Image: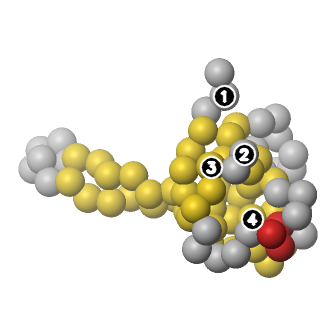
Amino acid sequence: MKKTLKGKVVSNKMDKTIVVRVDRTVSHVKYKKRYKVSKNFKAHAENSKDFKVGDKVVIEETRPVSRDKKWKVKI
């Protein structure tokens, strides 16, 4: 089973690559306050211009395509 993440497209300026921001909420261990943490992932997309900034996408884990790209766009 491959890992999947849901996120929002932040950039589509590269060729065959989009940048996806994945947000998650974390609870502080001591103070129990919940806060948002986000991380950017580079994902392989054959037609990166099909995705606009702000689109919601699902990315899945794959073999390394390059040094930074270890995800590909599923939807």
Q: Residues within 10 Å of mark 3 (few under 14, many from 20)?
A: some
Residue 38: numbered disc: none
- Looking at the image, tell me whether mark 1 or mark 2 is earlier in sequence order: 1
Instruction: Using the numbered discs, state the Cα–Cα distance from disc 1 to disc 4 in whole angstroms.
Output: 19 Å
**Which tag is nearer the camera, tag 3 or tag 1?**
3
Q: Which residue is mark 4?
A: 18
Q: Circle 2 is placed at which residue position?
A: 74
User: What percent of the width, then of the height, locates residue 17?
Assistant: 81, 63
Q: CA distance from mark 3 to mark 1?
A: 12 Å
From the image, tell me which residue sits under label 3. 58
Circle 4 — which element? strand
Three-letter code for the amino acid on which mark 4 is drawn: Ile
Cβ–Cβ under 8 Å for marks 3 and 2: yes
Q: Secondary structure at mark 1?
A: loop
* Mark closest to the chain's N terminus, 2 or 4: 4
Looking at the image, which residue is at 26% across and 58% down? Answer: 35
Residue 23 point in image, percent of width and height: 44, 57
Q: Earlier in the sequence, mark 3 or mark 1?
A: 1
